Amino acid sequence: MKSTFVRPGILPRIDALRRRRTALNTSNKRNVYCDNAEFLVYHWSGKSETFAPATGEQASDHRINIGDHSCRVDNGQPYPFTAEMPSKKHGLKLDAGNWAEDYHFFITHSPAVVEPGDMIVGDFHWQLDEARFFRYPDEVHALGHEARKLGAGGISFTHTCPDLSIGLALGWGGLLAKARRNRQKFEQFGNLESADYLRASEKVAQGIISFIRSHADRAAGLAATETDLENRAIYEQVAEVCGNIAEQPPKTLHEAIQWIQFYQIAERMHGHGNGYGRLDLLLQPFYEADIAAGRTTREDARNLVAELFLRYGSYMSLGGRNRELHDATSETSWVCLEAFDMVGGYNHLGVMWHADIDPAFWRYACDVVGRHGAGCPTLLNYEIFRASELRSGYPEADAWNVSYSGCQWYCSPGNEYSDHDVNCLVLIQPMQRAMDLAIEQDAADFEAFWKIYDLEVNRTADALRDFKNATYLWQPKVWPEMVTSFCAHGPIEKGRDITDSHAVNNNFTSVNVLAVPNVADSIYALQQLVFEKKKYPLREVRDAVNRDWEGQEAMRQEFLNQPKFGNDHDGVDAMTVRISEHIREVLESRRNNKGFCFRPSLFQYMGHTYAGPMLGATPDGRKRWEPVAHGMNPMHGRNRQGMASTIRSFCKLDFTKYQGGSLQIELQPTFFPKVQPRGDLVMPFATSFFQMGGVQINLNVLALEKLKTAMAHPELPESQEILVKVTGYSSHFVVMDRRFQEEFIQRVNYQNL
Amino acid sequence: MSELSALIFNLHRLSTDDGPGLRDTFFLKGCALRCAWCHNPESFSLRPEVWWLSQRCIGARDCTRVCPEEALRLTAQGLVIDRERCAGCGRCVESCPSQAIEFLGRSWTVKQLVAEALKDRLFFKNSGGGVTVSGGEPCLQAEFVAEFFAGCQAQGIHTALDTCGFPAWDDWAPVLAHTDLVLYDLKESDPERHRAFTGVANDRIHANLQRLADYQDRHAGRPAIWIRTPLIPDYTATEENLSALGQFISETLGDRLERWELCAFNNTCQGKYDRLGLDWPLKGKPLLNRDFGERLRQTAGRSLGRSHDVHLTGLI
């Protein structure tokens, strides 16, 4: 059955859902906000403990819209029952019991959204932090401000990947029973702390069961009054499915997909940020059983998966290897990818390549992203993912199941809580201090400068470690992640929240390192012009940079035109490797109080857009108002030798040592010949990149002129349709922050590879 | 390998326009033809040259100071290059702080160029691509190309020669022994129009195609042959031309032809003429109309008798 997919006609029912999805996104009902520019750069600003709550007492006045990738559907209203929240009526306490009381009240006072024509139902309008006060104690904040001064920051919040196979096997009734069993065990043996946690877990599970059942009741009520026979049949089916899975584990594909949708909602209610694992592996047993029993067809299955994608479009993956390390792609993988191909649009699906992947499926994935363009599916290198997990110390039994889970990061589902993508180290800051100190200390040569730089990077890392450790001590008390904990290996067995130490097996601290290419280009230029050729004294360069190069254009041009990362130039590429390896060694030498090291990610999702003016000009010839480089991608417009050279520069880094580093490519549609499937070009390109050691490709195919039109005329229907993979996430172009749009347009400069 | 070298003015990596798969195309300097529509005027001369990029210039004047031939003057209209005096030494290029002067025609040895191509071998392998040598007319440096291709083939890299077909046949033979594919240009069937458009007659080009066909017969079907025809409005893009070319190709090559590409006119080279201080006869000419292009493709296909092997490329 693995033939090349011919796009089918889309059902009118699915097409209506597709239009509703796009309308929600483009009318600002799916936005994720952060506090301010500082949050983007440091991933923490001291205002809120996560992305800015959209409503409520902690909502930010100066918030920035990161994009329309929230699971939450904004209905424009604040949560109507805030005053009745248990913590508001009886007092806020920082413990799981108090949190669970709030969560139970919150979810059982959230509406059951069942709309006509939906086979897969459920949405939510509010996140718990809009109604429950969420703030770390002042002692934590004080350390946060110290870290920020030195160029680092971060939150600790979601950004992991639960293992949904746990819940799909047990159902909520089974999960509740598991919590109860363990609670009784801990009571028997006198571990009251764990018993208390599990009592709170039971409360959470009961709330979710009740929430799911409310959908069954709602659908049954609608069916009773519906006169349209087709709609009534759908309501009846929805009522049956929701009723079946309120407590029992799902038995059919339809029930499994609906279970996943409810899990996403129940979990996203306490926070934005998780991935949900390998969708094809999760659904495969249900699909195959349904097909064998004649309960479904490939087409019906495709429509159900499409509905899941249309409800949201979370980070999930297809492909990769199975436990025996053979190719894991199956007919279910095709069904999932076909579902996306059918409905397109906003989605964060990734396809994980490996050396033995079914070539037909890989070609299809490459063709889909070539045609849809907005980075979907994200093309990923499973071999590097797994190697990097093994290098970190994950056992083989966990590493095989690695899944793309967010912008640039990947998890062993249910086995880790590693702060992916929520901490940042702004590498420009230690470099700036090193320049000042090298002038003061009259550094004689480049290695003397490097020693100072090394000390300053270490200082920043220490400050970040201290801040994170203080956060970790409080996190399970301040904001446990109790729904996630149900689908992880350890928390329920141990009675410890997933955010706590020793709950899951792996607790690294991931750190996004901002502006590595700028620092490498800068330090290389300093090495050449200041220390080797002695053309300019360091003081003169520092002063010129501090004045944003004013009156020093010839000097700026000279620094700008030193070799730059991304052109396969051995000298500057070696410096880039040295800078990256150095920050990695510094971070890996730091331990968090869960006993795990810090790990660098060569990526940062949006800070590069606002960091420029906050940090000032840099010795790579960059002026203050220019953005800094996005992730590990060469600074805008500086890779002039073609994509092959950029890739060679990129692949001089060993990505098994880092937590991701995506290559972002914006191609003009004219690149692709009309007569040839786009997969014919994307596939050899992506395969070569992965064989060279690359880890991720975000491919956008879009016309520069259309983006410019969209900026001028966002109201046009064709402008509203434009979707882009911004950095690690997707967004409709018209809802993006203006500065994001401007920066994005600067990147669209490839006529060809 | 000997120490033969060639002047190369451009390297286009991962090209999708010059043969199958992803290819590295090396552009050699020097050409005997002067096609009115030529989009690589920097190939005309067999000598190294420089050109000036106005948008990068900050007026530092380092170039005028270092030029040993005193060939450069910065005027209100920009940098004036006295091309009679310029010896192509490249010292101005090195001196410029803002990289506003570019060097055209770096000298490469065979060994260097093979090493350069090898960097992209994974892309070639995964895409069924390889190297293409273009120009200019690469057969003006036939000995170099032959050695380069031999070096590539020894490493398992597919080789393609993009030629106008004009050089004397005896110059070709050493190249063909190491060529997997010839991209053979047939621009205009009418001899007088051909002379008017390109500066030379087409009789030798036509005769060489026959020799190429014979060569292929003697060498077990190697190299493969693609014909390429530029579709230039008011020049080559006429029903009569495509019809006549189709007939000629059909008679000369028959089944030996693998593919015929009709390459739509593009005008992105205007800036190059400006930078070289040359007038371009096609300045401001509109691009090929898509429907007209498709009609010509059908005409070509009918005349050739094999429509599915005729492809229209380069339409924007």
Image (cartoon, rainbow, N blue to C red):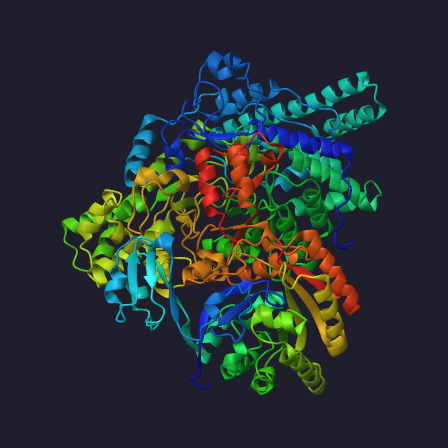
Q: Which of the 4 image quarters holds residue A29?
A: top right
Q: Note whether residue A379 is visible.
A: yes
Residue B93 % position (x, y): 32, 65
Q: Note whether residue A651 is visible.
A: no
Camera-nearest residue between A317 and A87: A317
Q: Which of the 4 image quarters holds residue B261?
A: bottom right
Q: Which residue is drawn at 63% across and 67% down?
A: B20
Camera-nearest residue between A467 and A71: A71
Q: As drawn, is B300 to the left or to the right of A370?
A: right
Residue A145 % position (x, y): 30, 33
Rendered position, A431 above or below A90 = below
Residue A286 % position (x, y): 74, 43
Residue A544 % position (x, y): 22, 47
Q: Which residue is drawn at 57% across and 46% down?
A: A375
Q: Residue at x 52, y 68 (%)?
A: B120
Q: As drawn, is A254 to the left or to the right of A563?
A: right
Camera-nearest residue between A198 and B196: B196
Instruction: Please state, as top left, top right, bottom left or bottom right, where the N terminus of chain A lies in the image.
Output: bottom right
